[in-house]
Image: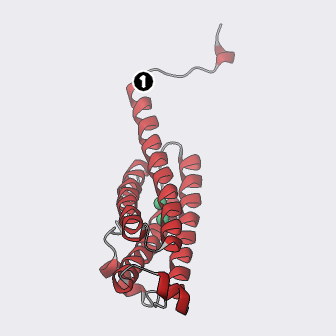
Amino acid sequence: MGQMAQKISKVNRGELLKALNEALSEEWLAYYQYWVGALVAKGPSRTSIVAEFTEHANEELDHANQLGQRIIELGGTPVLDPKKWDELARCKYDAPTNDWIMELVKQNLVAERCAIARYQQICEMTFGKDYETFKMSAKILKDEIEHEQEMEDFLADYNAGIEHSGEKIDDPADKK
Ligand SMILES: [Fe+2]
Ligand SMILES: [Fe+2]
């Protein structure tokens, strides 16, 4: 961290680096949660849900990249050993042993809610004290809020379908 950057920072650097490395570990786990889920998923609307999983996976990876860069700027070391991810992460990886797509949506929804709490925490920690980290965290928070909404929408769509189950959809061309 440069001299002036250090002088203006009013945040406890040790605490901030700890939170950033925890978040970095969580992003890698979130990436894998979506990535492997996209591979194994089975069930209704698979094509569109898997496309969304893949998009989210790429965004989680981008978050990991932003966190890693910021840790370096702050003079810290990004977590070097993947074996530490589970230990550091508060938002845990949940192996998709059940490949039913709605179970995968639920797992990712839990992870997104945890991520929202994480970035809210980092925003509160840095607001008015470290604007660069605040700006980054607020941007990631916005993405996680959108991710949560999308997972909720998949569940709502599926449940709306259940409510209408029993109603067979005829092709309009078959109407006599
Ligand atoms: Fe993320
Ligand atoms: Fe996310």
As drawn, 54 above or below 81: above
Q: Which residue is mark 1?
A: 164
As drawn, 105 above or below 21: above
Q: Secondary structure at mark 1?
A: loop
Residue 48 at what x, y percent from top left? 58, 47
Question: Which quadrant would the C terminus be assigned to in this image?
Answer: top right
User: For the view shown, which residue lies furthest in the top direction?
Assistant: 176
Residue 4 at what x, y percent from top left? 54, 88
User: For the view shown, which residue lies furthest in the right direction?
Assistant: 173
Horizontal side of 94 relative to 167 (left or right) equals left
Give the amino acid type for the residue marked by disc 1 in the picture: His
Q: Residue at x 46, y 20 (%)?
A: 167
Compare residues 110 and 94 and report the one nearer the observer. Answer: 110
Neighbours of disc 1 within 10 Å: few (<14), some (14-19), many (20+): few
Can you see residue 36? no
Compare residues 19 and 166 and report the one nearer the observer. Answer: 19
Residue 11 at what x, y percent from top left? 39, 79
In which quarter of the view is residue 65 placed?
A: bottom right
In which quarter of the view is residue 14 placed?
A: bottom left
Compare residues 76 and 48 and report the one nearer the observer. Answer: 76
Q: Residue at x 46, y 41 (%)?
A: 153
Q: Residue at x 43, y 87 (%)?
A: 79
Residue 142 at what x, y percent from top left? 50, 55
| Label 1 within 8 A of ligand 2 by Cβ | no
As drawn, 30 above or below 154: below
Can you see residue 148? yes
